[in-house]
Amino acid sequence: MKNKIAYIIKAIINSYAILFFSQNKVLGVLLLAVSFFNPVAGASGLACILIALACADLSGYYRQDIEKGLFSFNALLFGIGFGTFYHTNTAFFVWLLIGCLVCIAITLSLYVLLIKRGLPMLSLPFVITFWIILAAAGSIFRLGLEQRSSSVMYELITAMNLNAHRFPFYIDLFFRSLSAMLFQNNAIVGLLIAVGLLIHSRIALSVALIGFVTACLFNRFTGVFPEGLSYYHLGSNLVIAAMAVGSFFLVPSYRSYLWAMVVVPLVILFIIAFTRLLGIYDLPVLSLPFCVATILLLYFFKSRQSAKTVLTPLQFYSPEVNLYQYLNSKERLPDYHYFNFKLPFMGSWKVSQGYNGAITHKSDWAEALDFVIEDDEHHTYKNNGTKPEDYYCFGKPVLACGDGVVVAVTDKIDDNEINNVNLKENWGNSIVIQHAVGLYSKASHLKRASVKVKVGDNVKQGDIIALCGSSGRSPEPHLHFQFQATPGIGSKTLRYPFAYFMSEHGNEKELKTYSIPAEGDSVSPVTINNLLKDAFNFQPGTAVTVTTTDGRTETFEIGIDYGNECYLHSKETNAYAYFVNNGTAFYFTTYYGSKQSLLYLFYQAAYKVVFACNGSYPVEDTFPLQLAKDPLRWLNDLASPFFRFIKLKYEAEVNISPVEIVFNSKQVRSVGMKDRRISDAQLWIGQEGIQRFAFNTGKHKIEVKWDIKNTY
Amino acid sequence: MQKLKYERPYIKKLNTGMLNKFASANPAQAFDAIEGIPVKKLIEQYGSPLFVLSEKRIRHNYRAALRAFNTRYPKVQFAWSYKTNYLSTVCQIFHEEGSWAEVVSGFEYQKAVKNGVNGSHIIFNGPGKKREELLAAIENNSLIHIDHFDELYMLMELAASSSTKPRVAVRVNMDTGLYPQWDRFGFNYENGEAWNAISKIVQNNKMQLIGLHCHIGTYILDVAAYTKATTKMCGLAMRCAKDLNNPIEYLDMGGGFPSNNVLKGVHLQSADSIPSVDDFAEAITTTILNFGFEKDKLPLLILETGRALIDDAGYLLGTVIANKRLANGRRGTVLDFGVNTLFTSFWYDHQITPAQGTSTHTEPMTLYGPLCMNIDVIRENINLPVLDPGDHVVVHKAGAYNMTQWMQFITYRPAIVMIAESGETHLLRKAETLDYVDEMEQTPELTKSKAVEK
């Protein structure tokens, strides 16, 4: 019951906030409050929301979508509009209800129709419904509706202002234009909305201002509207269109800001055109120009083949979060783009020739790697190096770099004497494995008669497929390795990274993720610690009970969504933390929900865990910036589409012993060159998995016990 | 022109053997510096005799051995065999390189703990573990390698009242084709005792059986012995997983790899006849890889290699005391170190070279130590150039066992220095003094009065 009420309240507030593409509580409540500046309009708006929510819920739509206010904000607009235009009488209530139902029907139909193309319905349902009511009310048949005042409608389409200015002209106009979203013409209301907007998003407010200024300047220079733009068109069409394009549907950047300016003249053109066309039927354009212009642009953005202006991939209803999450994902989620490849050998090998190498890695075959084994003195051989057997790499196992099917094998070419090359059978003994459509790997110069697979065999990552040799164009034993897009043994090379490996350059050893081994570096595969790996092997269908020392308890359920993404879900706080476990690393991708949740602490503590045990070295990562509680956050937000000066870093280290693993991580805020530790966390892992974790912010220290149990 | 060194005349029997196309090589070229530091300078600074260790060589050996294994097998762990050389600095070099500790007594266990080794990285081997030592090992989560049933019963008793489950492995001995068969460590494979012990541990449920260990011998020159041993160990591990549902985490193949010293009684042994660490690695790893374990369930391979990692990193420097003519006309040379210092001379024909320039003429001779004991023979027969009293000699490949098995007997034990990678020389152990030797001694009253009277 408690949850149900919370859900309804959230849906109501979101129905308001979503008018400005937000889910911010403060903005939602503010909008709700100012809508009651006109009590009838406010009440009928709220009533319509309730009806819409009930209808959507009974129709079985996703509660997550209903909660966002997706299906109720058009009804809200309709309710407010209806309450603003008509006097209250019996007919008012009858037609409000009927109109509301029509609006909901159109909403749901349009939603289903447009969602397939990935397009939003915006306020189209409201526009259509309102036209229907207006057309019907203006007909010769008696609906019984009485228009409040003719000036209201008049105001909507002219620049006339009946109220006295409270602020300097343009500021007053800006505020009034914001209040137009609620069919008001009140600078105070607009001011309150602007404050709400500022709290919701610095980017959104700045884009709103950009839209406003662009529109005013455009009108000034072109003189399209000699008396100036009407506050209604400014608010309901121009500013909102700039916000939609500049900060909502596009990831904020200087490009999106430019588009926010470009959309303004477009909307002005539509306003003029639609006003003329609809004037024939005596209908106002309402927010139609905004809807048409935005949907048109969106459709154009979506149908591009390649582009630098990025559409928001995952909608968080906050320009800042969208931006930070996008930047963060781009930086740290290569799993979604690349096949997970492992180095094709065991132990540490040196890249003797890298991409675009000076010896043979040229032109079409430039993106290949040669590997040898070296000793401390940088010799590749022992004794005097006159026999292939003297070379450390000769006869060492070559592994399958990834799962796949063997598509080509040669195995009968002799290994060369040292310093001899076989130019006739250039590649020597080779194996080509297909990993995916258009993605192959090839190992060459293998030892004669060492190939352990045949064409058509399925291989798993890490299987020994052959031994390193010196056949083909190989003056001394080495392993030639390349990725390619075609299955031939002589195919040209393809630039492609290895997922995880250790790289040693001089005395610096680091863990590389999704990168290409560099010439001269010594690289070795990551050795997996099974204790660590098993501890983070969260299986959907299980649950974990976590308890703090002071008795707070939450249950984390492990689930998997329809997109095959795994998540931890805190039942009590309804927070979600999505994660990826690729066998080498566990890391969180996104977090939704309350920051009071214990899940939020765990998300920060185990943001990224690499199951490696090649010694101690730090794992570094960055948090999306929306997590930063920072006095400079708003300043950073304002500048964020162009540059970010705050960075939220994650650093972790693991101490492994066979019986217990202690995982230490910390969160560091870095501004310029200055680093400050915000929090640190510790995680204890034993034979049975995670045992407990502690989170310390300096002020608070929380220790949480971890108990795994099966739910199903 | 520098004055030529005086060489006393000598008489040598002319042997007319088979002619060959090679000229007779001088087997004893002067070895006058270790890692660039002159022998003469070392002796001047630290005295004679003197043990010298090379940090560079130790690290080189370790890395080469690790490379031999980890380029062939994904999960490899070395554990430094303390008994081979438990000088703290030596141990710490190995630990720094990533080695665990393998100890065989309470004393060595304490040394490992003192060296800062995490308890769970200490392997406790050996047939003579005491109750309190076992208790400490249980508490520290060390790996306890059980040697006999009496130890197993004691552990069961200790485990019953312990809050931590002891992590144990069973020591297994087996027929690997070597003679004599080492059957004194652990439980025999062929007669079923090993399986019996394994079953008892798993049934007991108060201990975790996580490993299997074997120590098939020492200075093993036959790679096939390791193939056989590994096959049997893998078989046991597989049975543990399948029959007892108790998968084995690691196989410890013990030590036994030879260094390239020359064993006594081996005819014409050369470097070629000694298998390299690579050969052993190939035998052991291919056996495990081909045995049929699931790829992500391959056991960790632990090696307790000692000798092969440090023997050639150690030298013993000494000085000639005197020359003499023996009854049969052979020359005898008396050196200032004996078998009490170079303990390995009991089983090795150590390579010994002069530390200063000499003529190319050599003479067969016997090298004696300074002890007044007939057994004190360093080399029964060696061809060396004529050596004068005060000349220095270098004993090669003396890094393993000597610095642990040496005895304070008749003479003091000498100093040990290490030449660091940076080229500096560091004293690791001071030469013994009378005070040191007397330190533990007590002088009760009963003799005191009489001594005074005299």
Image (cartoon, rainbow, N blue to C red):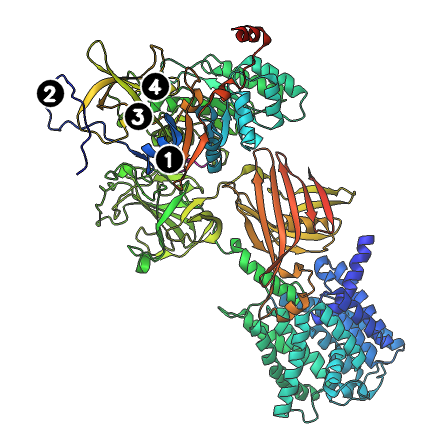
- Label 1 crowding class (10 Å Cα cut-off): few <14, some 14-19, many 20+? many
- Quick one: quadrant of the C terminus of chain A? top right
Residue type indicated by callout 4: Ser
What's the residue at 33%, 22% (across, down)? B222
Q: Nearer the viewer, mark 4 or mark 3?
A: 4
Residue type indicated by callout 2: Met
Q: Are marks 4 and 2 in contact (CB under 8 Å)?
A: no
Note whether A239 is above or below A581 in the view shown: below
- Label 4 crowding class (10 Å Cα cut-off): few <14, some 14-19, many 20+? many
Q: What residue is pinned by disc 4?
A: B345
Q: What residue is pinned by disc 3?
A: B274
Foreground residue among A265 and A282? A265
Q: Mark 1 and mark 3: span between their CA atoms? A: 19 Å
Foreground residue among A439 and A519? A519
Q: What residue is pinned by disc 2?
A: B18
Mark 1 / mark 3, whichever is N-terminal = 1
Element type at mark 4? helix
Note whether A236 is above or below B360 in the view shown: below
